[in-house]
Image (tube, helix red, strand yellow):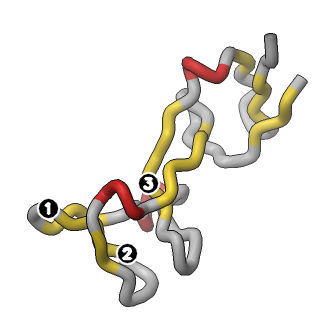
Amino acid sequence: MTTYKCTRCDWAGQKEELKHVPVCPDCATGHSPLYRMMKKGDLLECPSCSWSGPPENALREPECPECEDQYLREE
């Protein structure tokens, strides 16, 4: 079984414990708490570029559930 470890806070856990956040498919914005994808009605909107679309079109990438860092290492 694969264990993931955060490079910032040393959190370690399984894939099921990771938090998945929506990320812009055009510019990859979405991991920073200051630049999360914004919800406008039924659509998600990127704060950095002009991308707008339904939530299923956005990428979903994992991040640390403790510190929200996107850099995880597989062990």
Please, what is the three-letter code of the amino acid marked with disc 1?
A: Asp
Q: Could you tell me residue 32's position as x and y percent?
A: 52, 59
Q: CA distance from mark 1 to mark 3?
A: 14 Å
Location of residue 4 with respect to 48 vertically, above or below: above
Tell me the element at label 3: strand
Q: Earlier in the sequence, mark 2 or mark 3?
A: 3
In percent of width and height, residue 72 lies at 76, 38
The quarter in which the C terminus is drawn is top right
Q: Residue at x 80, y 10 (%)?
A: 1
Please give the label number shown on residue 42. 1
Q: Which residue is under mark 2? A: 46
Q: Is residue 13 left or right of residue 1?
A: left
Indicate the quadrant where residue 28 lies: bottom right
Number of residues whose C-alpha sits closer than 10 Å to that of mark 2, classed few (under 14), some (14–19) or many (20 or more): many
Q: Are marks 1 and 3 in contact (CB under 8 Å)?
A: no
Judge from the rendering whether residue 18 lies leftward or rightward of residue 74; answer left or right.
left
Q: Where does label 3 land, which residue? A: 22
